[in-house]
Image (tube, rainbow, N blue to C red):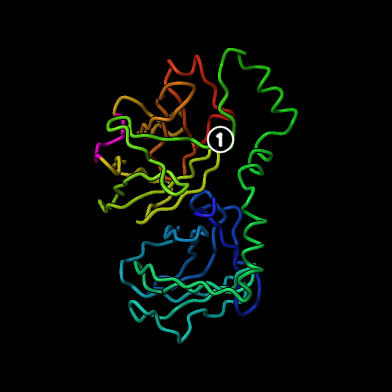
Amino acid sequence: MYNFISLNVKCPLCGESLMDYENLVDNQPSIKLKIKIYDNIGIIRLSSIYGSYNYICDFEIEKDSVAKFFCPHCNKILNTDEKCGVCSASMVPLILDIGGKVAICSRAGCKNHLVEFEDLSQALTKLYQEYGYQVKNVEQEILTPKEEKTVKEEVDEDKEIIETGTYLNAYCPYCKHSLNEEDMLKLKIINERNEEGYVFLSPYLNVFSSKSTIFLQEDKVVNDVKCPHCEESLILKEKKCEICNSPVAVISISARTKLIDFYICSKKGCRWHGLSEDDINEIKLEDSMEW
């Protein structure tokens, strides 16, 4: 779970929180800033997942353009004289609530960022406290004891229940190679700009953290999802998401003594997932309408 650490940050000038808990990016609270590029002024919400470069902005951002960032509370500019070691654009520092700072490059498309901790041992302790039992905490938040009892009573006793927080061993349905890599589920992705990269999903059922190596726009359907080993497309033409009607991708997961088809929506931000009609008769995904 440490691969999906969500950073909580504050303005380095006024100290106000920059977290937006209503508008999510990568299924996590976003980092809200004011942004100006040329004559365009608006709000940008950055992914708080460390290592993810996704965002939502009021206007389209051209690659290689350099932005000025402002605090939405004090309205002061956050760009500094410190230069990016990759592209020489100005760096933008943000204060971490666990102590220290993270600095991002102001040039669109540059992935350079730096993290500095005031006290490394103290920061690691806080990270462990916040994320060491993340799966357990998510399970407790999704269902109250009364709701959990009701769900279990409604499920046939003969059905296997894959509980929230269960680690899913995932495989390509074509070449059978494992899709799990360093506690993440790795898939090759092609976005709406036809750029190729990788998306990393949480392998824990109903834990929705994700990050990608390329920009994936929220609420947009990706062009393709592929196995990173055999390059076969995982998109199924004959099946659609039961929530937003977008194309779905299929992977195989291990359940009981066999591999079963597991469907995920190809639309960024949609949390639907499901099983085939045959497997639904034998297996129940706890709280199964979201991925």
What is the x, y in percent for residue 179? Answer: 37, 40
The answer to whether residue 44 is above or below residue 176 is below
Q: What residue type is labelled 1?
A: Thr
Image quadrant where residue 178 sits = top left
Q: Main secondary structure of the magenta part?
A: loop
Residue located at (62% from left, 60% from top) = 127
User: Does residue 4 appear to the left or right of 98 in the view shown?
Assistant: left
What is the x, y in percent for residue 36? Answer: 43, 73
Please tell me how many numbered marks the rendered image carries.
Answer: 1
The answer to whether residue 288 is above or below residue 19 is above
Label 1 sits on residue: 166
Q: What element carries label 1?
A: loop
Q: What stretch is highlighted in magenta?
A: 230-236
User: Does residue 47 appear to the left or right of 175 in the view shown?
Assistant: right
Residue located at (70% from left, 22% from top) = 150
What is the x, y in percent for residue 199? Answer: 38, 49
Q: Nearer the viewer, residue 243 or 48?
A: 48
- Indicate yes or no whether the magenta region holds residue 68: no
Residue extending furthest right? 146
